[in-house]
Image (cartoon, helix red, strand yellow):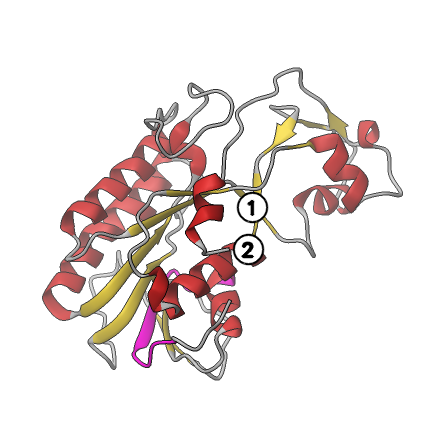
Amino acid sequence: MDFRNIYMKKVLIIGYGDIGIRIAARLPKQEFLGVSRSASAALPNVEFIQHDWMNESKLIVPSMDFSTIVLILKPTSPDSDGYQRGFLDASYRMMDFFNKNLSYEKLLIVTSTRVYGLGNGRNITEAMKPLPDDEQASIILEYEDFVTRESKIKPLILRPSGLYDEQAHWMKNYVDAYDGEKYHLRFTEANMFSRTNLSLVIANYICNKELFHISGPLICSEPAQKYSDIFSLVCPEHSFEDFFIGSDNIGKSFDPQKLLDSGLM
């Protein structure tokens, strides 16, 4: 990707963590303001503010004018209450703050393919209606709708499937910490998207004006892979059956063609 069209205004990343760090590292000449409820690694081009949107204290930012705002929110806990607080409750205060205080040219939201549930079956595309099958997925979808409705401009929504780190895959981590209890897999195949690729997609959207008018949502997913095949790649010295119990349920899969056609990859 040609980064010559990079914006000079700052980029605001809400939920500045691992993905935000990767984005900023890709664009060392771009200035960022990173906001997160927990401390994060410092980079020379990032000004960091620790702030919890559920805290009554007002966020004070050094700039009110941004080229792009990127929202990478996370639940405060895995249960529905954690999703309610981390996504919806936080966004109520966040969007109120944005609309009263900030100007921005682009807004990008990172959510999840979880909103499609299991009812859509195989080869899910963006044209299919989300069918959330648990409360957490319903909250994510409600969060998308709320931010879209309240934003000054139409946001681009990215829906990545299970994020993974090439250097620290969760299956290898499970093997390294194995306590004798095998892990029951829900499905035969995994739908995943690397953190490296997600940071690339977002960095391209931030800095390239030619990609300004891409419409979403965009499914961010690699071709579905069998868990057993993934395991043989990340743990070639071990046997899959020694650590995992497979499933007969193939599960859902996604068609990432719209993302590939967008130019963001």
Which secondary structure lies at badge 2? helix
Q: State the separation of the CA atoms marked 2 and 1.
A: 7 Å
In this view of the protein, can residue 35 be seen by the observer?
Answer: no
**Is disc 2 in contact with disc 1, using a CB cutoff of under 8 Å?**
yes
- Is residue 170 shown in magenta? no
Image coordinates of residue 143 in percent, x first then y, are 27, 42
> What residue sits 81% from the left and 31% below the top?
240
Task: Tally the numbered discs.
Answer: 2
In this view of the protein, can residue 112 be seen by the observer?
Answer: yes
Image coordinates of residue 76 in percent, x first then y, are 39, 48
Which secondary structure lies at badge 1? strand
The label on residue 197 is 2
Q: Is residue 31 left or right of residue 105?
A: right
> What residue sits 38% from the left and 80% below the top?
31
Q: Which residues are magenta?
A: 6-18
Q: Which residue is mark 1?
A: 193
Image coordinates of residue 66 in percent, x first then y, are 26, 73
Hey, which residue is sitting farthest right in the picture? 237
Q: How busy is the neighbourhood of tag 2: few (under 14 within 10 Å), some, or many (20 plus)?
A: many
Image coordinates of residue 16 in percent, x first then y, are 42, 64
Three-letter code, disc 2: Asn
Three-letter code, disc 1: Phe
Is residue 184 positioned above or below 43 on the image? above
**Between 169 and 261, the one nearer to me in the picture:** 261
- Is residue 9 shown in magenta? yes
Is residue 203 positioned above or below 252 on the image? below
> What residue sits 49% from the left and 47% below the top?
260
